[in-house]
Image: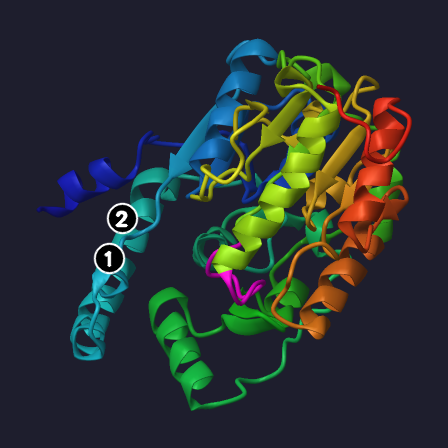
Amino acid sequence: MNDEYFLSYQIKYKRASLKRLVVFCGSYPQIKNTLYVVTRMHPDVSATIIVLANHDLFRFFEVINEKAFHNKLDVLYLKTYQTRRAKANRLIQRVFYLPLDIIGEKRYLKLIYDTCFGGLKGARVFFSSRCFCSYTWYLLNKLKRVNTLVHIPDPSCDALAIDRSKPKDIFELAWLAVMKLTFGYGITVGRLSYTKFTCIPNRFMEKEVDKAFSIEERNEMMKDFDLDKFDVFDAGSYKVLYFDQPIAGTGCVDNYDTYKVELAAIFAILRKYFSEHEIAIKYHPHYVTDRTMMELGVVLEDFIPAEFLYNDNIKMYLGLSSIALANVKKGLVVSIADLISLANDERSKQLKETLILRSRSQILFPESLEEFERIVAGVSGVKGATADRG
């Protein structure tokens, strides 16, 4: 496969040159930052929004672009390189593919830049991600030479205590070395208790970014900015909205079968007090999850952001520790964190603390199914914790 064909296969939309305003949007929590930039900070400048490897997020911007902006925006979707070692089952195969993957991905990154960004000069380039953003880092590191970089903090990271220390062991050191060889020497490691990831280094933020807004500055300038005028979705009317999130392979639970049984018991209680059409399920965008566990309710489109689903008809917002729960400003919010057998007490404590720190309203944490049923019965208007709708 030659380079030109490979690039056209990986990149859904190519541009010979981009607009004078470019905004990298890496995740759903960054949508507000992105829309603020293109409508409030630079409303009269043609904008290009870059979405990396999140097709649900890209679909959202496609709909918004058509219905709210009358297709005045450019929305560019870029896939990431598919490494050979990711599909290898044996260690010796992964080791064999490693140098080939590094060379292949470096070549692909250069092709992305040359094809999509090579002619970009004098633009204002906005970004929010500082973590989980190796591709953004690579592109920014090149764009800095003849463009102005501006950073607006990602709100999903406000409450996270990210460890940016040096690698802790030989395996983490080896992983970081591969990242540096692929994306550039300056990239650093970030760490939460359950995962590690690449980070944009502090030195880059201090030396190369022309303006880096603080969290306080971001909050102040966006305090009167809401997303209501971009609500172009007909999400229906429900009484219970459940926000699912991927669990398998995350280390949150030790026994996935136990988790399925516990979740089934939770939904059995919901079924007693609410009918099928009164319950909506919103799966996490951009992730593959087991959809056979919840065989009731109306499944909403994955790509619609949670903020466009909140409304006064909903009696209860339910989930484990999704950011969507934390962002609810008005309404009853219930977390099932204490109803699920999480991997350990420390993991449970961490999930709850992070959710509370991010929350914009009070969150209830029922400690038993009986307590949960009393809450459900109360919001349904049915008297008695064991009442049955028949």
Q: Which residue is mark 2?
A: 111
Q: Is residue 157 left or right of residue 385?
A: left
Q: Where 285 sits versus 90, above or below?
A: above
Percent position (x, y) of residue 165? Answer: 62, 82
Between residue 291 and residue 14, name the one nearer to us. Answer: 291
Who's the residue at 64% across and 66% down the image?
207
Q: Is residue 132 left or right of residue 332?
A: left
Between residue 248 and residue 327, name the one nearer to us. Answer: 248
Q: Identify residue type, mark 2.
A: Leu
Q: Is residue 123 visible?
A: no
Q: Are marks 2 and 1 in contact (CB under 8 Å)?
A: yes
Q: Is residue 78 visible?
A: yes
Percent position (x, y) of residue 157? Answer: 70, 56
Tell me the crowding category of disc 2: few under 14, some 14 to 19, or many 20 or more residues within 10 angstroms, Cα based: some
Who's the residue at 54% across and 74% down the image?
189
At mark 1, the secondary structure is helix
At mark 2, the secondary structure is helix
Q: Is residue 95 left or right of residue 57?
A: left
Q: Which residue is mark 1?
A: 107
Based on the picture, tell me whether residue 1 belongs to the magenta stretch.
no
Who's the residue at 46% across and 61% down the image?
249
Residue bounds of the magenta highlight: 247-255
Percent position (x, y) of residue 120? Answer: 44, 39
Q: Identify residue type, mark 1.
A: Arg
Corner quadrant of residue 283: top right
Colour convention: rainbow
Question: Magenta stretch mostly in which secondary structure?
Answer: loop
User: Most extreme residue toward the left, as rendered?
Assistant: 1
